[in-house]
Image: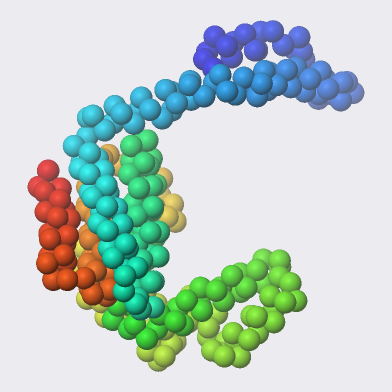
Amino acid sequence: MDKKFLKRIINDCSLNDFIEDENASKKHEVFDKYLEKFTSFLYSNENQLIEHFWSEYIALSEVATLQSSPLLRRYFIFLDCATAVYNYVAEKSKQKSGSELSEHISIQLQNDLRQFKGILLLAINGCLNSVITEYRTMYESFVIGQYLVLHPDLVSIYKEHSQFLRYHLTRLVGNSKPEWDKVYEDYIEKYGKEFTENYGWTKDVIQKKKDRIIGTLVKECELDTSLVTLYKYSCSYVHSSTFSVSTRPDLNSLKVFFQATMYFILQEILSYMQEIGLSEKEIIILDNILMILYEDFKNI
């Protein structure tokens, strides 16, 4: 579709009077039929349009961006190597009797690697504001994962909490069923009403209700303050502040977010390797492969 095509669509329309009057219903009928011809033409040619979609919206723009951005190329290299390392470790874990914690880290890594890839694709396609908002999700996932490494006894209740929230949310939106309500009530009876909180699964460790927030988890995990600063910055985009709406970040300004997400993946893979009991040789070599790529990225 181009300007010439749209101009023809406008000029070929026989209806020129769009004033709402006693003939409005007839006008709408004529106009709807005319537009239906247009949409029917597009839908009947979807397969032929795929090549246009690919070249116009995906391939050419992505390749051009990758060719011109060493940051994204290195980010892609890290993603590829991190995925390979995860797959190696996951295969090794099948030979061992895994713990609940290792199972959780594995699932979290699968999710975070997919999101890591999503951040890369958003950046390649120029959706830079979305890259910043996605950081928030990865950050919170990372914090929770690191907190569970410190408190592995909470993994089982965390898993139950994730199941409980499904029933809790269906009740909130009025889409529940009697059998789901029964499961919901069983959870409440087992863990108490505080289980409805986002961090209700931490109550055995965090005694005060007001302290069951992500900030408490961050403090105990002793995370670098720069990660927290980026989180706060990301929140201003998630909630669409006047600042975020009026600014247009560039790739260079996103480098710190790329570094942080690489750090998350690096630390999670290290925790995974340690939890399943890989040999010291394997851990050192694999960890340093990713660490070198991480450090090289910082020096671009």
Note whether 97 is above or below 114 in the view shown. below
Kindly indicate the quadrant of the structure image that contains residue 170.
bottom right
In screen coordinates, is 142 left or right of 25? Answer: left
Q: Nearer the viewer, residue 195 or 243?
A: 195
Please name whichever residue, 287 or 237, is drawn nearer the observer in this view of the structure.
287
The residue lying toward the viewer, choosing from 267 and 256, is 267
Q: Where is residue 62 in the image (x, y as percent from the top left)?
A: 34, 31
**Residue 116 left/right relative to 21:** left
Residue at 77% over, 13% down: 15
Type of colouring? rainbow
Residue extending furthest right? 22
User: In the rendered view, would you say 212 is above or below 44?
Assistant: below
* Location of residue 6 with respect to 292 vertically, above or below: above
- The reply, left or right, for residue 59 in relation to residue 39 is left
> Residue 196: percent from the left, percent from the top?
55, 80
- Can residue 72 be seen? yes
Residue 243 seen by the camera: no
What residue lies at 60% left-to-right and 24% top-to-bottom? 46
- Residue 211: percent from left, percent from top: 38, 84
Q: Give how far across and how far down residue 177 sits, in percent.
A: 74, 72
In this rendering, would 248 be left or right of 292?
right
* Picture residue at 29% right of the left edge, 53% below the top: 83
Q: Which residue is drawn at 12% across and 67% down?
A: 281
Q: Quadrant of residue 205?
A: bottom left
